[in-house]
Image: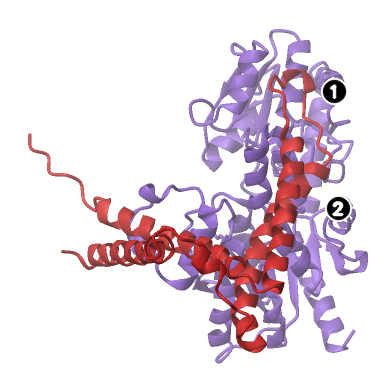
Chain colours: A red, B purple
Amino acid sequence: MPRAKIWGFLAVILSAGLFALSVFSFFIINNGDFSTFSSVDLNGLNSFTYYSAAIPVAVIALWVLATGFWIGWVILTIKVVPPMPEIVEKKDNSKIKAFFLCLITAALAALLVYGVYIRSFWSLAVPALVISAVILGAIFWVGMAIITTRATLPVNKK
Amino acid sequence: MRVLIVGYRGNPYCGGQGIYIYNLSKELAKLGAEVDVIVGPPYPDPLEGWATVYKIENLNIWSIKTKDIPPEKLNRIFSPWNFADYVLTRLHMFPEMETFSFRTFFALKKILKTKRYDIIHDIQSLGWATVPMKGYGIPIVTTVHHPLTKDREADLMGNRGLWDKTTTVLFYPLVMQSFVIRRLDRVITSFREGIDELQKAFGVKRERVSVVYNGMDVDMFQNTGEQREENALLFVGNTEDSKKGLVYLFEAMTMLPENITLTIVDDGPPKKMTAADMIKKYNLGHRVKFTGKLSYDALVSMYSRKTILVMSSLFEGFGLPAVEAMSCKTPVVVTTSGSLKEVVSPDCGVLVPPKDPAALKDGILKLLGDKKLRERMGENGRKWAVENFSWPVAAKNTLEVYKDVVREYRSGK
């Protein structure tokens, strides 16, 4: 088997395995009882220990939310006149959607900051789960592409 | 003067950057500068005669679906910068400039062990790592033909719906460019109004901007002496770019007599549908044709044979087709948007306000109806192009900017 394909298989197995592990740890190991997580007490941790984990996770999550807010804000505030108003047939309600995008991202950001402040387990777990899912998803997808890509043309049986 | 030119794309046949790097480095070398080039793919032809080229890796995968990425690129994705590139492109961002700047930062560290430069000239990449590059103790100038805010505005103009607009906003790295450009030693732009545009878009101080007109190959773009067609308009440019204002040209076409035709030098359907859809809407199918991409020789021939070049742009950072046409003694009808009012002198063409199809129609009719005026403007255009827009002139003016920046840098200003 070519070396590239081996790397592809490894990427798929590793990313799928790690993702399955995180799903198992969150949803299966406790038989779907999420109250166990809510009772996790992070207040017992030394502040330095807590924030050394909380700040990096929160910064990445806030960056993503800020990007979402900024996109909404740009769409909401930019003044762009369509070239020929009469050729625009579809009604564009993107400004309304952009307003809600701003509202939701701002609310989520506020919730995250509050959650980190009161040391809620979920304020760290949800962003960490989402971020790792995105990265593992990317690795999985590339691995699949490497495995399924045909590097040479198929043999012409005729 | 020892110059390091840095550009994230180096194709010498298409795309402004590659052509700019190729010609500028060549002419600077003729003026006695020692030139090196750090460049991303597509790489330029060997510049062995005048410059050392350091190639920087980049997969160029921003518009390719994962399953369509060629195997040789796919196998290289798991290196750190390539993976960052991959993830960000899947999120609809355009990270090429960012990752290029980081790759260049580290490559330069190695190069500086054996070489020294008086100045670094960044060609419109403005990546994050250009700022720490200042730590190497070399002044950095950048060329920005026009701020990307103009491209974003033009794209948003054509976008319908939240998703299209979101991907447009994500695509342009304006926060990065705005942060980086204000920290560089000088910005070179290609027209005077560009100073205001850069100030408005990025808050660049006026005194930190120098104007150097772009260059073009005036030897290659010469009238071929072929018979000129009558009533034949020419448009050269990307029909998918809303900044080109094609809709106004089509509207003007509907007001012009039926015997006036338009040739568009770009791909038509099925590759590019925007212009084709408009042509159908305005019922201009029998008067407009596409040539597809042309070789330089064919393009020069096209300029030499058609009656007038028309540019209906809403914004131009330089307006290369106008200069190429003038160099081929072809009169032009252009809008006064962006650089065009500087690039086209009133005795080489007709200038009309942008977004005004009636004015465009009047300008076209004025020229089509007066052969002597066209010939006079054609002669003036050639002279104007040679005097102002040849590569030797551009390189000489760029070198003056370098000297000024180095002088300022060394005097600690």
Taking depth in this image into account, of B7 and B183 the one nearest to the observer is: B183
Taking depth in this image into account, of B334 and B199 the one nearest to the observer is: B199
Amino acid type at mark 2: Glu
Q: Residues within 10 Å of mark 1 (few under 14, many from 20)?
A: many
- Quarter where residue B257 is shown: top right
Taking A7 as reference, is B333 above or below it? above
Chain letter of disc 1 in the image: B
Q: Count the marks: how many?
A: 2
Taking A8 as reference, is B164 above or below it? above
Taking B261 as reference, is B180 above or below it? below
User: For mark 1, what is the residue?
Assistant: B363
Taking depth in this image into account, of B260 and B61 the one nearest to the observer is: B61
Chain letter of disc 2 in the image: B
Left or right placement of residue B366 versus residue B77 in this view: right
* Residue at (78, 49) in percent of width and height: A73
Percent x, y of residue A72: 73, 47
Taking depth in this image into account, of B12 and B89 the one nearest to the observer is: B89
Amino acid type at mark 1: Gly
- Secondary structure at badge 2 equals helix
Q: Is residue B29 visible?
A: no
Q: Residues within 10 Å of mark 2 (few under 14, many from 20)?
A: many
Taking B204 as reference, is B314 above or below it? above
User: For mark 2, what is the residue?
Assistant: B197
Percent x, y of residue B395: 73, 65
